[in-house]
Amino acid sequence: MIPNVAIADSIESNNSVLQPSKMRTAQLICFGLIAVMNLSSWIDLYGVFTELPLIIPLAPEGWALPSMMLVCNCIANLLPVIVVFLRWYQGKKFSEIPYIYLIITIGIVSCFLLSLLWHKTVYLFGRERSVWLIGLVFTISLLDNTSSLVFFDYMKRFRGLYLTAAFLGEGFTGTIPTVLLLLQGIGGEAICVRTSNDTLLKPTFTEPRFSVRVYMFVITGIIVASLLAFLLLRWTNIISLADAAEPANCSEETELDIVLNEEEKSAIISTNGSVQSPIAIVSKQTTEKTFLFLLCINVVNSLVVYGILPSLITYIILPYGQKALYYSTFLNTIGYTMVLVFSIRHPHLSIISTIVASIFSYIIAIFLIVIATQSPCPWWADTIHGGFIIIFSDLIMALITGYVRITIGNRIKDQWSNKNGLFYFGISVQLGSTLGAVPTFLMINVFDLFVAREPCHVYCIT
């Protein structure tokens, strides 16, 4: 009997060693699936905006196309408003799951149609118009704006550490189109060629390695992968294997639960396989006053980062060269991903640190807006050091506001007792984006307060 007891003890010991390893693998898989699922949130719209240098020369609207797309995006906020009212009306009966299926599925269909029809025009109101392109962009905008609400609302079902996976997936919605842009081989300086009369310079651009159609097919494939990831989360036991579900009584979470949650967060990213020591400081519940204050900060951050600066980016950076615009776009997307990785180890900021960081980022944003008002000849135009200053300033501001946004989301998820917290977090993002985009559109297209800088034109003669 003694040998049998010894064998049983050995098997039990081996199971106890293997079990944490299996759970950690399940946690990593669950983390990855959530990140891939969230790729579908904005990648289609970001993908279209990234391809504008190739689309605009063939569209009858020309350089008016970006502002028209911006208007579509603003009008598309009607659907999130409807979802908000449905959320309030249905209360606990509301489920975000059908909306996620709808967003991802229609996103796949829209991107596929866009890859086939983006260049098709319709004669309407006396001229050719990109009806298919603008109509599909409007459809995509409806979906993506709504995804900010329902995707974050879905994360209430998971433990706090998995919110970082959602931010990571959202961050890659800008990184992946940028990488595709690199592979496509566009983004360099325009080549200025003299016209036949030898008096004017005409910009010419190198041909891309693959077409807009292929590019949009790739984006469609990524959204299909997002749908598969969501199906795996919904219809397999990966969530239970990873113990990723939020406990039912999350509002009555004990101090030990909070500490263990931080321990799990360290365990997932441990490189040597050992579980890190839990954080000694125990989180406290966020008050309603603090919750509303954090939402206000998120509104202002979104107003600047998603509303104002994207519309002004060409006025800010093009005076320093087309390569400066390319480097800025690339560094911002890569930098945001690095911030997400950093936030895994450091998920929270104190209220004071949040305020100080936000104020510092607003100062940089004001500086960049001033630069935009001076286009086409701002300070240090056409200089290397000027380009470095502007790119560095834009990068630092994007990193700070990105990190503040992530830590606000983490604090709401971990410390706000009401499960609706992340839903309102998504509302604050959309509200800020709209409040920033609408007046910026009016300043650019109605009041003509900003002057664009065209390639191969001589400016800033000294």
Image (spheres, rainbow, N blue to C red):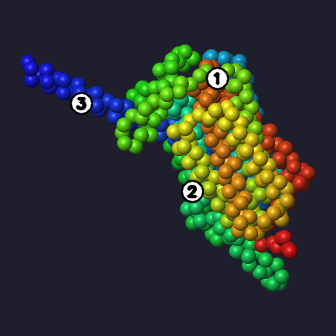
Label 2 residue SS: helix
**Circle 3: residue type:** Asn
**Circle 2: residue type:** Val
Query: Marks 3 and 2: CB-CB under 8 Å?
Result: no
Give the residue at x 83% y 65%: 377
**Circle 1: residue type:** Thr
Q: In terms of image quadrants, where is residue 151?
A: top right
Camera-nearest residue between 67 and 123: 67
- Where 425 sits versus 374, above or below? above
- Circle 3 Cα neighbour tier, 10 Å, few/some/many (<14 / 14–19 / ≥20): few
Label 3 residue SS: helix
Q: Which residue is mark 2?
A: 179
Residue 94 point in image, percent of width and height: 63, 20
Q: If the image is split into quadrants, where does the C terminus sit? A: bottom right
- Circle 2 Cα neighbour tier, 10 Å, few/some/many (<14 / 14–19 / ≥20): some
Residue 396's tag is none
Say if residue 79 shows up in the picture: no
Residue 397 point in image, percent of width and height: 69, 48
Mark 3 / mark 1, whichever is N-terminal: 3
- Where 53 sits versus 238, above or below? below
